[in-house]
Amino acid sequence: MKKIDLIDTISKQSNIKRSEAKNSIEIILEEISLAIISGKGVEVRGFGGFQKRHRKSRIGINPKTGEKAEVSEKFVPFFKPGKLLKKAVNKG
């Protein structure tokens, strides 16, 4: 599902204008992004949590050339699914 599909679905199910649904989705995604960036993270019970994780520097290998290169340390976004989401995925 793409962002546009999500906007259309919310608009139809909530009986609101498409522009209002789009604005709502944009605000939600922006707030989740800001919370991850700040290090607070976001937890949605039953769905999962979004946070940032630290990755140490390491030696990586270029798959095309086989050449070794150093990959610097960095932070990456991380999603941990909740219990209910895990159960739903494993059922279907």
Image (cartoon, grey):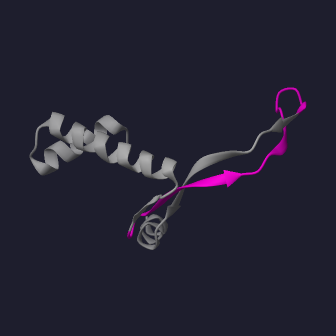
Span colored in magenta: 45-68
Residue at 17% over, 34% down: 19
Residue 77 highlighted magenta (yes or no): no
The quadrant where residue 59 appears: top right
Q: What residue occupies the far top of the structure in this picture?
A: 65
Where is residue 5? Give x, y as percent.
Answer: 29, 39
The residue furthest left is 15
Q: Is 64 within the magenta?
A: yes
Between 28 and 46, the residue placed more toward the observer is 28
- Compared with residue 37, is residue 66 higher up or lower down, i.e. above or below? above
Query: Residue 15, position in %: x, y?
Result: 9, 46
Tell me if 11 is positioned left or right of 89 in this view: left
**Residue at 44% in and 46% down:** 33
Horizontal and vertical percent for residue 64?
83, 27
Say whether residue 52 is left or right of residue 84: right
Q: Quadrant of the N terminus?
A: top left
Q: Residue 29 at x, y = what percent?
A: 36, 44
Residue 88, compared with residue 16, is above or below; it is below
